[in-house]
Amino acid sequence: MSPDSMTPGSVRSAAALNEQIRALWIRAGGSLSAQERAEYELLVVEWAEAIRGEVIEAA
């Protein structure tokens, strides 16, 4: 998935995003290209937002 195809404010779970991050690292063989790094950074930001949302819901 390219960073451009990601929907801002999407409502994916932290677990789903974590799986995407893991899959990205596996596909990349542990070394990210510039494009993969951009995708990774977007996924991590979205994952952090999802974690915050899940913590707030739990409280």
Image: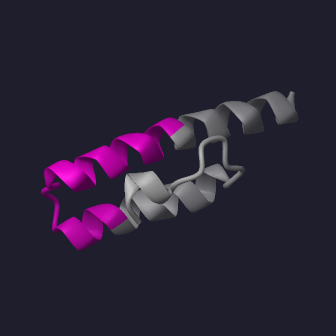
Along the line of sight, the residue nearer the viewer: 59 or 46: 46
Above or below for 17 versus 55 = below
Q: Residue at the spot x=85%, y=35% of the render? A: 58
> How many numbered marks appear?
0
Above or below for 30 versus 51 = below
Q: Residue at the spot x=28%, y=62% of the render? A: 25
Q: Quadrant of the C terminus?
A: top right
Above or below for 26 versus 21 = below
Residue 45 drawn at (x, y percent): 48, 36
Q: Is residue 46 left or right of residue 43?
A: right
In terms of secondary structure, what is the magenta stretch mainly?
A: helix
- The coloring applied to the image is one colour
Q: Residue furthest bottom?
A: 27
Quadrant of residue 1 within the rendered picture = bottom left
Based on the picture, tell me whether residue 34 belongs to the magenta stretch.
yes
Start-end of magenta stretch: 24-45
Residue 49 drawn at (x, y percent): 62, 34
Above or below for 41 versus 29 = above
Along the line of sight, the residue nearer the viewer: 16 or 59: 16
